Each structure stands twice: as C-alpha cells, then as structure tokens.
Image: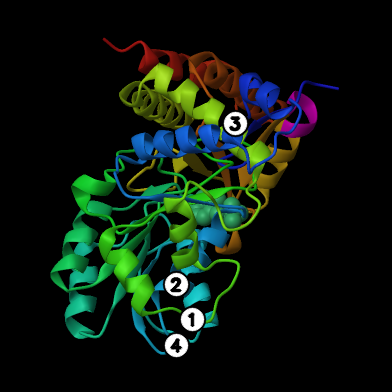
Amino acid sequence: MARRRLFTPGPTEVPWQVREKMSRPLIHHRTDEYRKIQGETIEGLQWLMRTKNPVLLLTCSGTGAMEASLVNLTRPGDQVLVTVVGKFSNRWKEIAEAYGLDVVAVEARWGDPVSPRDVAAALDANPDVKIVFTTHAETSTGVLQDVKTMTQLAHKHGALIVVDAITSLCAEEVETDAWGLDVVIGGAQKGVMIPPGLAFLTVSDAAREGMERAGHPVYYFDLVRALKSYEQGDTPWTPGIASVVGLHESLAMLKAEGLENVKARHAANARATRAAVQALGLELLASAPANCTTPVVFGEGRADTVRKHLNDVYGLRVAGGQAQLKGKIVRIGHLGHYFEADMLMLMSAFESTLKDLGMVDSVGRGVEAMFGEYHQK
Ligand SMILES: *Cc1c(COP(=O)(O)O)cnc(C)c1O
C-alpha cells in the first residue's frame, strides 16, 4: 500500500517531532511540570496570535470554542450579525439560531468574501446588533475575508467582534491586538499541526466584561470560570494533557522557523498551487484566495473520482466539496507542515491522476508552473 499522507485543510499532517512528544508517558496536570508546559504553551499562542490577552485552552474541536464564545457573550433574543460565505461561516448562523438569537446574516456567493460595504449597511439597518461573528478564512471555499475592516465597522457600531481564525492562524496576518479583535478562535488540527481535540481562544477586556454581564446558562464551557482558573495557571477541568504537550512542541517548531517565515511559506505554497492549477487549465473557485487551501472546480461527479484515484493509487488524501459544493470541487490543503518538496510531490501525483483518468494528455505542466512560481526571481 502507498504511504498515506494528508493534504487536507484539517486535519493536517502531524510532524514526527510532535508525535514523539505526545507518545511519551503521560504527566499529571496538577503538577509544576505540567503547569510549566501549559504556561509556555499559552505564551506561545499569545506570540502566534499577536496578543497580550488571556488565551483559554478548551478540550474540544474548534466548533466547541465557537459555541463557547457565543454562549458566554449573548443572552436569548440578542441581535447578532454573521457573515455567511460557506459551510463554516454558516455554522455561526446555526449556533446562533440554536440559542434563540436574532440573527442578521450578510451573505455572499460561495467563492467570494462578504463585502465590508454590505456589513456596514447591515449594521446601519440593525442598530441593536451586539456582536459580529465572522470567519477569517472560509475553509469550504478557500476564501479570505477582510476581518480588519469588519472590526473597525463593528467597533464603530459599539459591537464586539468574534473571529474564527481556525484556518488563518499560521497562514495569514492575524493581528489580535493591533486590529482590536475581541475574541479570536484557533483549533488544533489546522495550522498548529496537532491531532484534533483542542481549541483555544483569546479574550479582550471588553469581551470579558461582556461575558461577566451576559451569558446563557452554561457549565462546561463557562468562560468566566475558565478565566478565573487561568489567573491561577489552571483550567477548571482536566485539560487535554497530551494535546497541550504536542502544541508546546509545535509552537516551538513554529518559533524556530519564525512567524514571518511561516506565513511566507504558506503564501508561497498557495501561490504555487494556484499557478499549477491554472497551468493545467482548471478553474479556481475563490475570488479572494486564502492560504489554507486551494479549491479546484471540476464538472459534476469528476471531483470525487479525482480524489478517490489520488487516494487509492497514490496514497494522498485531498478534501472534497461540502454542502452545495459537494462533488464539485477538490480542495488541495497546504495549511500546516508542508514545504516546497511536499507540494511538488502532491502536484506530480495530482497530474498523474488526471493523466490516468484521461483528463490531460501529459504530466508535467503543473509541476513546471509550480516550480516556476517557487523560483521566481
Ligand atoms: C475546521 C474548522 C472549524 C472547526 O471545525 P471542527 O471540526 O469543530 O474542528 C471551524 N471553522 C473553520 C473555518 C474551520 O476550517
């Protein structure tokens, strides 16, 4: 069987250094040894997320942190604004509706970001909006949204902003303090390269005040309680010890590479992938492409044939379309531990797949374009 590798925008590949640390004998969480690791991990997240705000660690996938932020910041009936441009941003709408909120949705075609002008107009038309919940990189369409401008609009309106940065962290500029982001959410199995099961979020002073004033009935995800534990260097419940140990290592790797280099590598991988896809005569979905994934448009049914062949014959797994894009796109992931050689390897297998399926006449055009993009002077 071929060596199996993930080229999906979550879960992403876990580097061997991280796996090695996570496989060591478990330590207890109420010890100085663990507290030191957790403290350094939180400092590492503050470095990554460009903030001095507290960063809370939650034992759940990214969606848990989305729900936690919403439940703690709102009361039933509150009016909130969400931007819907794909499956993940639509999740904000679904969570808000599940909690009985009055939801104002600003939408765009799947493949585009929302226009800040539409957000401004929606805020003007809805003076009661208390919080804006948005998605920085929409992973289902590979689109990047203008969070910086949306934050200015939200704050001018007197609203807080909560940002799902789950697939933008490591891959894009995320300036939590400089942009004034109130809550920024990250997840394990994306840019920080650990297995799923951990999420984290930043809490600004204004968000903390909001949580102390508002809130639905909540227990496990009581973030006011979590903030109190945080001040003691603790978590209210048993933390995901192995995940935190893994994150400690992956953050050390990212620090050694340097944040600017990490972001530049993601941007280069994304640019090179787009160049290769276009050289193959295929269509890109995203009008404002993010660096986490490159969705490629295929005719109905063909996307999944390509994915299956790439996986079954070459051992490489890429993602497919979700919801209304199911069966119509292939999403090549390049978020996480992927370097030039990884992308060249993926592209040569991708082209080989297209050749095997009779969709191109020769192999090499994509790799050549990709190489050219990496080595542009
Ligand atoms: C992966 C992802 C999430 C969280 O999904 P989980 O399956 O709960 O980890 C949320 N938002 C975006 C944009 C994502 O890519």
Q: Look at the numbered disc 2 and give the secondary structure of its residue.
A: helix
* Numbered circle sitting on residue 76: 4
Q: Mark 3 points at which residue?
A: 33
Q: Earlier in the sequence, mark 1 or mark 3?
A: 3
Q: Look at the numbered disc 3 and give the secondary structure of its residue.
A: helix
Q: Is mark 2 within 8 Å of ligand 1?
A: no
Q: Can residue 267 be seen in this view?
A: yes
Amino acid at dot 4: Pro
> Which residue is drawn at the image coordinates 72% and 26% (left, top)?
356
Report how far apart the C-alphas of labels 2 and 1 lie in the structure.
Answer: 6 Å
**How many numbered circles does the render carry?**
4
Q: Mark 2 points at which residue?
A: 72
Contact check, label 1 and label 4, Cβ < 8 Å:
yes
Contact check, label 2 and label 1, Cβ < 8 Å:
yes
Report how far apart the C-alphas of labels 3 and 4 lie in the structure.
Answer: 42 Å
Q: Nearer the viewer, mark 3 or mark 4?
A: 3
> Between residues 220 and 354, which one lies in front from this camera angle?
220
Q: Look at the numbered disc 1 and give the secondary structure of its residue.
A: loop
* Numbered circle sitting on residue 216: 1
Up the image or down, 59 lies above or below 336; here it is: below
Report how far apart the C-alphas of labels 1 and 4 lie in the structure.
Answer: 7 Å
Please state if 223 lies on the left or on the right of 351 as rendered: left
